[in-house]
Amino acid sequence: MKRLRIGILASGGGTNLQAIIDSCERGEIDGDVVVVISNVFNASALDRAKKHGIAAFCFPHEGFTREQHETDVIECLGQHQVDLVCLAGYLRMLTRLMIDKYAGRVINTHPALLPSFGGKGMHGLHVHEAVIDYGCKVSGCTVHVVTAEVDGGPILLQKAVPVLEDDTPETLQERILKEEHKLYPRAVQLFAQGKVKIDGKRARILET
């Protein structure tokens, strides 16, 4: 079977990027990260990519419309024959241009159990603050397909994490991130194995 060609979009440190790279190198994903793209020149994700010999590009978004910026990103992904696009801390809202071009082939991870604590403004520590303020006993992480609805695409995988009585947003974030680093590569491997079928709002995991 052809190895999956993975493109990753990241704006920051890229720890989920690193988790996917490491999983590919360990043979846990039947694929390879072939390009990393950022909208931030000094994003650590670009350095991570270069250390592993992966092509790395930056397309700043300032001064461009979202569509103009995404046109450059899409062209770069196309040049590297990307099969699956993974968002790894990419702090840009995607337009229909990208979503339609890679329909069903853009995935993201969210640090909560969607559909709870998702949507506009729900990112980073804001999510964990909201979970704790609400008094939730369980949180976790979700890997989902990206659609035009923010955090509303078909859910691929989820992992529950208990919320402890003495948790702070930072401690909860740390525990959930460890699970994200396991869950995200697993979701990528499902695509590499051809086991994902999008059926309306549901992502079905095929056994064959």
Image (cartoon, grey):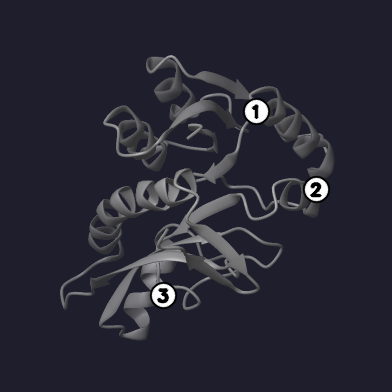
Q: Residues within 10 Å of mark 2 (few under 14, many from 20)?
A: some
In this rendering, does residue 159 appear at all? yes
Residue type, label 1: Gln
Residue 115 in picture, x, y percent from top left: 50, 77
Q: Earlier in the sequence, mark 3 or mark 1?
A: 1
Residue 65 in picture, x, y percent from top left: 83, 42
Residue 26 in picture, x, y percent from top left: 26, 31
In this rendering, does residue 65 appear at all? no
Q: Residue at x 71, y 32 (%)?
A: 73
Q: Which residue is mark 2?
A: 97
Q: Residues within 10 Å of mark 3 (few under 14, many from 20)?
A: some
The local secondary structure at tag 1 comes to: loop
Q: Earlier in the sequence, mark 1 or mark 2?
A: 1
Residue type, label 2: Leu
Q: Which residue is mark 1?
A: 81
Between 168 and 71, the residue placed more toward the observer is 71
Q: Nearer the viewer, mark 1 or mark 2?
A: 1
Q: Nearer the viewer, mark 2 or mark 3?
A: 2
